[in-house]
Structure formats: structure tokens, C-alpha cells
Image (cartoon, rainbow, N blue to C red):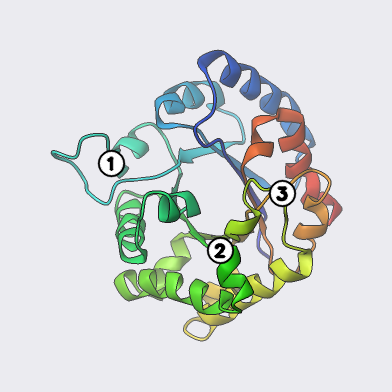
């Protein structure tokens, strides 16, 4: 039985003061979260603060990105070893904003995935289509291409140590959300594609949904057979909203 995971991606938001308040709220409400694993991914500069605040709590933390390089003259980059040094468990790779805004290719994302694993981090591999691609009816081919780049470099067995997050680009930060059935269809496609190569890995793989998940739609989304939690953006910046999403698997 796959245990749900709810991971908050804070993106480029927060301050020392606001993060302290957010973490206090999350810690105080964790007792009501029964069936989900919980994680937060703050901006790099606040990871140490998060690590100090969450030690001993049932919340993991991670980076919003990771360099494909291990060290050296790579100004502005953050290596996997630096994340593990700060106690990170996860690293998000291939988020749609990295792909679309910063031009990161499938192959580059695969190298970041490999770097995360090399340093003992669990990659949260983001895949998903744009609105134009959905309207063209090529969602599955886009998602397959993104997965294939990772599998070609690392092999399907690498997914045993990873999480996949399906995030339809057209539903991120727009207020639009894929219907539970739309999301389930893509999640089932992802699991089926991996199952064609390794059924055990596919059966155990956590596949998260990311795309305007809120407290009022999380339970319905998480009730789908192949949706194993969420990668939460804006709603993760509000402790009450985030905790309500973390409790949603109990209602599914």
C-alpha cells in the first residue's frame, strides 16, 4: 500500500519571520495528520532555518532544485551534497517553471535527477504538458518523453528511489485544476508506462498531483486510485490550508 506524500513547494516566497510563523503553525497541527508523509521545500537560503525548526518533527525538507554538477566553478548553483549536508531528503527536479522559463531540457533534467540520487536525495521528478499540448491531444507523448529521458540515463530501476509529480502546466498557479478524472488518467498512464518495464517499481511509486491543489479539492483528487498525494504550491504557504491538504488522505 502506497503511503501518500504531501510536499509543499514554497517557490520564491518567504522571509525569516514569515517562515518561522509558518513552521510554528505546521508543527502545532501535525498531530492531526494521520496517514500522509509531509515535506516542505523552501528557498535555498532558508533551508538551514527550516532544518533547525523541524528537527524531531514528522516533516521532511528538501530543495526546490539541484545542480547537475557536484562541485566547482558553477556560480549560483547548489550541489546535492550541500542539500544533504543540511539534512534534506528531497530535491525537486524538472519543475515546469525550470523547463519553460529557464529552458531546461529533458536531458538536463535527467542529469539533475541523477545528481540528486548520487547524493542520497529522493528526486521529485515533475512532468506535465502545457495547455497547447493538451489541446493538441499529445499529453501522453509529452509525459512519456519526459520520463524516457530519465529512464534512458538512469534506468527504470532508479524510479524505485524517486517520486513522480504530474503537474499540468495549465493548472499551476492559474486557479484551474485538472478534474480528478483528468488527473487520474495521466497518473494511470504514468504507472502503466513504468509497469511495462517493472511492475513492482510501478506499484510502489508515489505519483503526486501538482496543479492548484487546495483544501477544498484535495480529498477528491487524492481518492483517485493512482494519485498518491500532492506537490503543493501557493496553498503550502498557509499553515491551516496546508495542514488541511495533509489531512485529506484521511477523508479519501
- Up-down: is 72 above or below 223? above
Disc 2 secondary structure class: loop
- Up-down: is 203 above or below 207? below
Residue 78 in the image: x percent, y percent? Answer: 30, 38
Answer with the quarter of the image where residue 73 lies.
top left
- Up-down: is 146 above or below 247? below
Q: Which is more toward the observer, 73 or 105?
A: 105
**In the figure, is residue 44 to the left or right of 69?**
right
Q: Which residue is mark 2?
A: 130
Please name the residue shown 31% across and 65% down the image: 107
Disc 1 secondary structure class: loop
Of labels 1 and 2, earlier in sequence is 1
Disc 3 secondary structure class: loop
Residue 47 in the image: x percent, y percent? Answer: 44, 28
Front position among marks 3 and 2: 2
Residue 222 in the image: x percent, y percent? Answer: 75, 58
Q: Which mark is residue 213?
A: 3
Q: CA distance from mark 3 to mark 1?
A: 30 Å
* Category of crowding for the residue at label 1, using alpha-carbon neighbours closer than 10 angstroms: few (below 14), some (14–19), many (at least 20): many
Q: Which mark is residue 79?
A: 1
Q: Looking at the rendering, in which quadrant would you find the C terminus?
A: bottom right
Q: CA distance from mark 1 to mark 2?
A: 29 Å
Q: Looking at the rendering, in which quadrant would you find the N terminus?
A: bottom right
Amino acid at each position: 500500500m502506497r503511503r501518500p506524500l504531501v510536499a509543499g513547494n514554497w517557490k520564491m516566497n518567504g522571509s525569516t519571520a514569515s517562515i518561522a510563523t509558518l513552521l510554528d503553525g505546521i508543527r502545532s497541527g501535525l498531530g492531526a495528520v494521520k496517514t500522509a508523509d509531509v515535506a516542505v521545500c523552501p528557498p535555498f537560503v532558508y533551508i538551514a532555518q527550516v532544518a533547525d525548526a523541524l528537527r524531531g518533527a514528522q516533516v521532511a525538507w528538501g530543495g526546490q532544485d539541484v545542480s547537475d554538477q557536484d562541485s566547482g566553478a558553477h556560480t549560483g548553483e547548489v550541489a546535492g551534497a550541500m542539500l544533504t549536508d543540511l539534512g534534506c531528503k528531497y530535491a525537486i527536479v524538472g519543475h515546469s517553471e525550470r523547463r519553460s522559463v529557464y529552458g531546461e531540457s529533458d536531458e538536463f533534467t535527467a542529469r539533475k535527477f541523477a545528481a540528486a540520487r548520487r547524493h542520497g536525495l529522493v528526486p521529485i521528478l515533475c512532468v506535465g504538458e502545457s495547455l497547447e499540448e493538451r489541446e493538441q491531444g499529445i499529453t501522453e507523448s509529452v509525459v512519456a518523453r519526459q520520463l524516457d529521458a530519465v529512464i534512458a540515463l538512469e534506468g527504470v530501476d532508479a524510479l524505485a528511489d524517486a517520486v513522480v509529480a504530474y503537474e499540468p502546466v495549465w493548472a499551476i498557479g492559474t486557479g484551474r485544476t485538472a478534474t480528478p478524472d483528468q488527473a487520474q488518467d495521466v497518473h494511470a498512464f504514468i504507472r502503466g508506462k513504468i509497469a511495462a518495464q517493472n511492475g513492482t517499481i510501478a506499484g510502489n511509486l508515489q505519483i503526486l498531483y501538482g496543479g492548484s491543489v487546495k483544501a477544498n479539492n484535495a480529498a477528491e483528487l487524492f481518492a483517485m486510485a493512482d494519485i498518491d498525494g500532492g506537490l503543493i504550491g501557493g496553498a503550502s504557504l498557509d499553515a491551516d490550508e496546508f495542514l488541511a491538504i495533509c489531512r485529506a488522505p484521511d477523508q479519501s
